[in-house]
Image: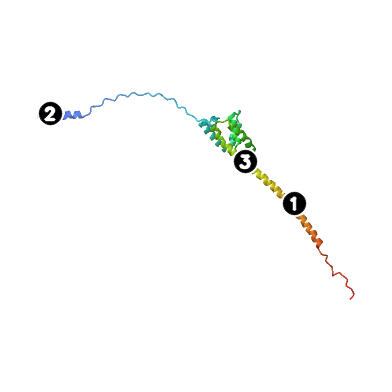
Amino acid sequence: MKQSLVLASLALLTACQLTAPPLPPPSELPVEIVPEQPPALELTEPEPEDILAFNDEPATLKAWLDYKQRILLEPEAERLRLASLETQDEVSQFQLALLNLHPDMPYVSRFRVQTQLTEVLLSLPPRLAALFSWELTFNQKLLEAESAVTAVTRLNAQQQDQLERLQKTNRELQKKIDALTQIEAELNQQPVENNNGGNNGPG
């Protein structure tokens, strides 16, 4: 009996040790106050015209490349924009010169601006000058081709005029030859004797 009580006490003690003690009531965690951040300022890309300048910075070179592509596709819109400016600085004057290199401009305009831009490029930074040298090279080749076509057209017109005058002279000579041939034929024609109307002698 006593042994049974000891075993029961040991079993109860073991059960108490295996049972986890109750957790203390959770204490309220302190709330960390995060200071409100000011709204981030949106960085806007500058307009291409804002960074067009006479330097060879990468952003400037990229802006000029984009500008050249835009005026090649829509030259009239850019002409109107530049014409609406109250004052024109060196950059806007250079832009107008580039527009005069457009293939849709007359030969005289492109020929005149070719010499002007060639002088301007000598004063630009090397990489920027190289960026526009292709336009001048292309325009020079185009001017030479147009000059050659004009010369050939003028020569063809002169030859055509000479050919027409020769043809006219030949026609006039042919008429004279035909007239002379007719006269010669009439002179060589033998007189025809009229035997039917002659008188017969007495038989």
| Type of amino acid at the residue the image marks with label 3 | Glu
Look at 77% across and 56% down and name the residue there: 177
Point out residue 29 in the picture as x, y percentages from the top left corner: 32, 24
Look at 79% across and 59% down and name the residue there: 182
Q: Quadrant of the C terminus?
A: bottom right
Point out residue 79 in the picture as x, y percentages from the top left corner: 60, 34
Q: Residues within 10 Å of mark 1 (few under 14, many from 20)?
A: few
Position of residue 35 in the picture relative to residue 154 (left or right): left
Q: Element at badge 2?
A: helix
Q: Earlier in the sequence, mark 1 or mark 3?
A: 3
Q: Please say if 161 is above or below 203.
A: above
Q: Earlier in the sequence, mark 2 or mark 3?
A: 2
Q: CA distance from mark 2 to mark 3?
A: 122 Å
| Type of amino acid at the residue the image marks with label 1 | Thr
Closer mark to the observer between disc 2 and disc 3: 3
Q: Residues within 10 Å of mark 3 (few under 14, many from 20)?
A: few
Pick the residue in front: 17 or 145. Answer: 145
Q: Which residue is mark 2?
A: 6
| Type of amino acid at the residue the image marks with label 2 | Val
**Within the image, what quadrant is residue 184 found in?**
bottom right
Kindly tell me whether residue 142 is visible in this rendering.
yes
**Within the image, what quadrant is residue 2 found in?**
top left
Q: Which residue is mark 1?
A: 169
Q: Which residue is mark 3?
A: 144
Furthest residue toward bottom:
203
